[in-house]
Amino acid sequence: MDRIAQAFARARSANRAAFVAYLCAGDPDFDTSLAACRAVIEAGADVLELGVPFSDPLADGLTNQLAAQRALESGMTGARVLELVRRLRESSQTPIVFYTYYNLVFARGVEASVRAAKEAGVDGMLVLDLPPEEAGEFSAACRRHDLKTVCLVAPTTPDARLPGICAAATGFIYYVSREGVTGERREIAADIPQAVARIRRHTALPVAVGFGLSTREHVRSVGRAADGVVVGSALVNVIKSNLDARANIAQLLRAKAADLVAGLA
């Protein structure tokens, strides 16, 4: 069983959903980012979703756009992102999933991108703007290198597309709970249980829910219906709010992540 499957299985055996924490690699700089990633893992994250900084992150709201901008301005490159993963692997076996865009994969070469990610210690990859119908080359490379694929389902996804999307995923399904981009919301969508049930009719893979989840109450509510709960902007905003006191970021993130994880207890 691969690390992603193990993480969801451990959570299931504890009668809870898995906590998936998103951070942008290199935000606001390499060393602080490394400490931040370690902090959320130590706080109980079951899966680390690591954003690969990109100049045009079209699926992201302002919070994650600015995180990517900070990372790029600090000197993060594809090679440095892989180095960050290798450093994390020195002390952790928590599964890592790249959250990325196809331009970055294509520019380096699909085969080379997948191979490099796997060799660094990445477990899976979510390519946000690559629909399964056009992902043949990418999916084949992932199968060759045993890198798991994560596929998106949105509220607007028609039933006719669900079998193909679910068949293309080998890690888990990421259900985008709201239309639009990433970002904190005051309220969560009301139809999440029905949406998760609709997806489960087509796959035995775990279904994780994200976009807009930001409080312990959100995590608790979604965790009752889903196999995983994804929180990103609420964690990234801890970094944004403490850029003048970077030495405190890891400690503050650990506390924020622990509070969110407590919603799954």
Image (cartoon, helix red, strand yellow):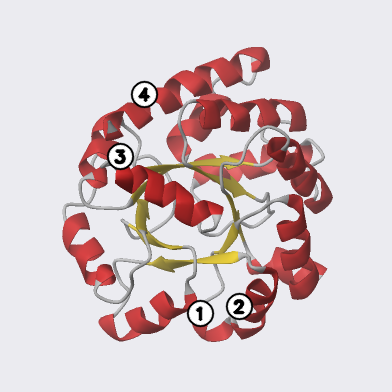
- Circle 1 packing at 10 Å, graded few (<14), some (14-19), many (20+), is some
Question: From this viewpoint, is residue 36 visible?
Answer: yes
Image location of residue 215, percent across then percent down: 31, 32
Amino acid carrying mark 2 in the image: Ser
Q: Vertical placement of 207 versus 224: above or below?
A: below
Residue 13: which disc? none
Residue position marked by numbered label 3 in the rendering: 14
Q: Are marks 1 and 2 in contact (CB under 8 Å)?
A: yes
- Closer to the N terminus: mark 4 or mark 3? 3
Is 17 rendered above or below residue 244?
Answer: below
Mark in front: 4 vs 3: 3
Instruction: From the viewer's perspective, tell me whether residue 262 is left or right of residue 144.
Output: left
Q: Residue at x 29, y 80 (%)?
A: 158
Point out the tag, 4 or 2, that comes first from the N-terminus: 2
Say how many tags the image has: 4
Left or right: where does residue 117 sit relative to residue 129? right
Q: Secondary structure at mark 1?
A: helix
Q: CA distance from mark 4 to mark 2?
A: 36 Å
Structural crowding at the residue carrying mark 2, measured as other residues with C-alpha within 10 Å and reported as few (<14), some (14–19) or many (≥20)? some
Left or right, residue 22 beside residue 109: left
Query: What residue does disc 4 label?
Result: 259
Q: Secondary structure at mark 3?
A: loop
Q: Pick the residue in front: 2 or 94.
A: 2
Per the model, the C-alpha gap separating discs 1 and 2 is 8 Å
Residue at image location 25% in from the left, 62% down from the top: 196
Residue to which mark 1 is pinned? 132
